[in-house]
Image: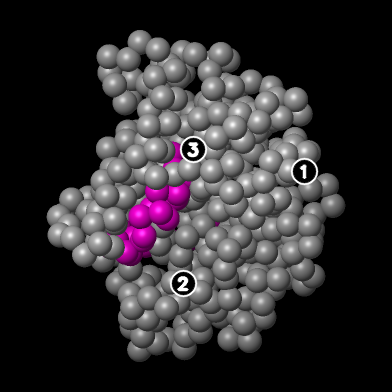
């Protein structure tokens, strides 16, 4: 498959080897001083080193790689100091959702005063001057959050660990170089967790009470791609790690599907999300749980809660998996089976989250805005019931 262009929701160059168009892309923006923003893991990979070296041949280049774990405000401020010092005129966001989100937040602080939390969504947030935002080029290294096609960044407060949303249309990357080759080395456990993150975005976007039939169509096709290729991608990653032979064409095709599905999920959730994400955000805040893994563990329990509210929508989802399905609950059973086949823990106890955190999780989940768009209203007692079911495993 050759490299193709999607002009939706931004300009996307998609296909194997797309990352090699980076220098040409920088020139197309009239930039001369790129600054890479990535995480510690990506910074040590050969393909990233080769990408930086190729860029250095054409431009004055800097690299900031001080990102790890769930991103926090101090990482943003350190990165902004680095990009200002370099006098960067374009930000190259390379990595998974955390790195891309930090890169977007760095773009805000590159020419704004204060701290990133001043610009967090809320009644007292400082305005973002779009004219001060440097252009962003995104190169995703995972197929999960789809942050490369989003207009927001999620950054945690260093002290409270509360997740804050930074939003501005100018944070949508100008160009995405979506290269499935970059994801070929992703370990099996991260392929599974990030893949379930994409699946959760797609499912919750479809189920939300908002009306957006275009997003519904995107979500359903994305779910089909996940059903077709996530297990294959994980299996290939396992074989690769064990030194066993891997069908290279099959592996690349699976990674291509998952990269598409990830971007489709982030595009679809313009229609908003739901209760699974409120549960997961609380888990990341209280227990520092990986976001994709938190979604993967909570998704079946949240979907059982939602089934009675929109049974006809669940039936449509079930028929993506099996055209002969006659019960929407079959879709939830498929999620549970997929999760088990990917070696994802069946519940919070198996994940290692202490049940003693339950009373701390509930108010954070209640305060999270995602469940406001859930197809079924969610109370504190409902969150307690959903979490309790998850803790039973």
Q: Could you say where residue 84 lies in the image, as x and y percent from the top left? A: 64, 82
Front-lying residue, 155 or 282 = 282
Q: From what the image shows, is residue 34 above or below residue 276?
A: below
Residue at the disc numbered 2 = 41
Q: From what the image shows, is residue 283 above or below residue 80?
A: above
How dense is the environment of label 1, judged by Cα within 10 Å: few (below 14), some, or many (20 and up)? Answer: some
Which marked residue is nearer to the observer: mark 3 or mark 1?
3
Q: Residue at x 79, y 70 (%)?
A: 114
Q: Visible in this render: residue 143?
A: no
Q: Could you say where residue 360 lies in the image, as x and y percent from the top left? A: 77, 43
Q: Could you say where residue 56 lies in the image, as x and y percent from the top left? A: 39, 87
Among numbered discs 3 and 2, the one appearing first in the sequence = 2
Q: Is 306 on the left-hand or right-hand side of 52? A: right
Residue at the disc numbered 3 = 346
The magenta-colored residue range is 172-200
Among numbered discs 2 and 1, the one appearing first in the sequence = 2
Residue 360's label in the rendered image is 1
Q: Could you say where residue 22 lies in the image, as x and y percent from the top left? A: 36, 72
Q: Residue at x 31, y 26 (%)?
A: 321
Front-lying residue, 297 or 45 = 297
């Amino acid at each position: 498959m050759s490299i193709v262009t999607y002009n939706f929701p931004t300009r996307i160059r998609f296909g194997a080897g797309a990352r090699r168009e980076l220098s040409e892309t920088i020139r197309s923006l009239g930039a001369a001083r790129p600054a890479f923003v990535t995480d510690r893991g990506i910074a040590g990979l050969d393909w990233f080193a080769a990408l930086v070296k190729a860029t250095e041949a054409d431009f004055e280049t800097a690299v900031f790689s001080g990102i790890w774990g769930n991103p926090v405000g101090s990482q943003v401020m350190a990165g902004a100091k680095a990009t200002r010092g370099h006098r960067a005129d374009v930000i190259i966001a390379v990595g998974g959702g955390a790195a891309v989100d930090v890169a977007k937040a760095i773009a805000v602080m590159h020419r704004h005063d204060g701290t990133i939390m001043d610009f967090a969504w809320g009644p007292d947030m400082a305005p973002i001057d779009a004219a001060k935002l440097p252009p962003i080029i995104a190169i995703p290294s995972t197929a999960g959050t789809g942050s490369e096609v989003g207009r927001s960044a999620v950054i945690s407060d260093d002290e409270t660990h509360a997740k804050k949303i930074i939003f501005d249309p100018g944070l949508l990357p100008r160009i995405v170089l979506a290269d499935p080759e970059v994801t070929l080395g992703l370990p099996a456990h991260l392929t599974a967790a990030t893949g379930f993150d994409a699946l959760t975005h797609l499912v919750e976007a479809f189920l939300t009470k908002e009306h957006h039939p275009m997003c519904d169509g995107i979500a359903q096709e994305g779910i089909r791609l996940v059903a077709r290729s996530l297990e294959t991608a994980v299996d290939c990653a396992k074989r690769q790690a064990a030194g066993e032979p891997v069908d290279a064409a099959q592996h690349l095709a699976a990674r291509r599907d998952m990269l598409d599905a990830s971007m489709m999920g982030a595009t679809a959730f313009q229609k908003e999300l739901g209760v699974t994400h409120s549960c997961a955000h609380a888990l990341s805040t209280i227990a520092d749980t990986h976001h994709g893994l938190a979604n993967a563990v909570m998704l079946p329990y949240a979907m059982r809660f939602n089934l009675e509210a929109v049974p006809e929508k669940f039936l449509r989802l079930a028929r993506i998996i099996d055209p002969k399905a006659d019960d929407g609950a079959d879709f939830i059973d498929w999620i549970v089976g997929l999760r088990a086949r990917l070696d994802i823990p069946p519940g919070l106890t198996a994940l290692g989250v202490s049940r003693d955190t339950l009373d701390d999780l509930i108010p954070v989940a209640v305060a999270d805005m995602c469940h406001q768009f859930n197809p079924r209203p969610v109370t504190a007692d409902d969150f307690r019931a959903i979490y309790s079911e998850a803790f039973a495993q």
